[in-house]
Image (cartoon, rainbow, N blue to C red):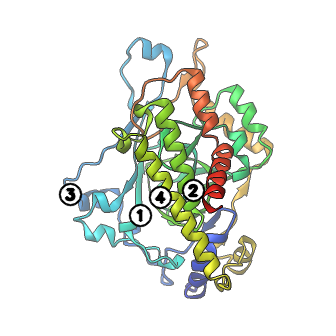
Amino acid sequence: MNSPEPLLKEILKDALAHLQEPLLFQNMLQDPDGSHEWKLLEWDFSEFADKLGNIKLPFRVGYNARLTEFAENKEESEDEMWYYFDYKYMQEWFNDKPEILASLNWRKFGIDKDGSDSTLWIGSKGAHTNCHQDSYGYNLVAQIHGRKEWLLFPPSSSNFLEPTRIPYEESTVYSRFNFFCLSKEDEKKVLDVPYKPKVIILEPGDVLFVPWGWWHYVESLDHSMSINVWLPLKEDSRARLKEALVKLTVATIGGQKYSASEDEDSDVSYYTGLIDAALQECKSDVENASEFPSVKRTKYSSWTVEDLITQYPEYVRPLHNLEDRELQRFLQEKQERFPKSNSTQKLPQQSTDIKTIPPLGTSLESIINALCHPDVVTKAAELLLNNTQG
């Protein structure tokens, strides 16, 4: 197999920020002789652990139990538990381990970044990330060990996935639906979403491209390890404005205890300062665009998903669109992991990496979610920008 470099690398450097659909990249992390481009792919879990030395990683622990078992304070079974070390910047954890940070890079995708700019995800079977939409940028995910299943919905699905900002997490919009094990009522709602989702099981060496705005639910099918990198978009300045508006709303209505942990002691002026800074950034973007109106799109930015798949079938593949029956079976298989016993359903552990917060009243939570709904926040940002620029 010939190396995809250098042309594909140059194409991806320009095209990735403009692509609108997810893509699977294969054989990109291998050299022509079959060796690995990334040293990280050559280390198994034991070798990686040896290189970490005495570093202790904080794994979140989830436990799936019937409510009757919880009430009886039954001891957990290892078979019912999962562990997740997720969304951790490698630079913060392995700053004194240059061999690890240098064991990967994204150069074959036209991106001059390595482990210092990437995040690490290690999980056991069943570890999962709840369905959500990232507010900023686009995403490349490399599977290192084990398998991970991805279910992705297009941005147009947002209203149907019932977005929520409670609990609040920076730059992350969660769906109310728990895809780890949907209720029958929620299953019907998901099946009524008019936009078809895509599904992919990542194998070691695979790289997934996730464009901005795509909702995704991710679950480890084995003991797994993956690496990802987020890349910025020019639209991120407006996204930061919308996120600042959400922060202000959650903090002032829900109280500081519902804000991001780093904002707990902040007052209203802190949040209005974030909004002012974001407005200034958006204003600068507009001024720069008007100052250089003749700047053309880069050479390969007009390449489409279809172009890449057609020209580079050895390396670029589409994701499978789930038909209605396939999606129904997918959801039912998740439910069947938790069989009913004496009319008591096993209840899955939620998987959000956030602080524990007291429950909100139903009315207050509904108010916050209404005011923080993507459509509302987008309109508010537009009004602010118009007032500022006017």
What residue sits 65% from the left and 50% below the top? 378
Secondary structure, mark 3, is loop
Q: Quadrant of residue 162?
A: top right
The amino acid at mark 3 is Gly
User: Quick one: 20 or 70, which is closer to the camera?
Assistant: 20
Residue 53's disc number: 3
Disc number lying in front (4 or 1): 4
Q: Earlier in the sequence, mark 3 or mark 2?
A: 3
The residue to which callout 1 is attached is: 118
Rounded to the nearest whole Å, what is the CA distance between mark 4 and mark 1?
26 Å
The amino acid at mark 2 is Ala
Q: Earlier in the sequence, mark 4 or mark 1?
A: 1
- Residue 21 position, x and y percent, is 69, 63
Disc number lying in front (3 or 1): 1
Secondary structure, mark 4, is helix
Rounded to the nearest whole Å, what is the CA distance between mark 3 and mark 1?
20 Å
Q: Earlier in the sequence, mark 2 or mark 1?
A: 1
Disc number lying in front (3 or 2): 2
- Residue 33 position, x and y percent, is 48, 83
Density class for disc 4 (Cα within 10 Å; few <14, some 14-19, many ≥20) is some
The residue to which callout 2 is attached is: 239
The amino acid at mark 4 is Ala
Q: Quadrant of residue 268?
A: top left
Q: Earlier in the sequence, mark 3 or mark 1?
A: 3
The residue to which callout 4 is attached is: 277
Rounded to the nearest whole Å, what is the CA distance between mark 2 and mark 1?
21 Å
Q: Quadrant of residue 336?
A: top right
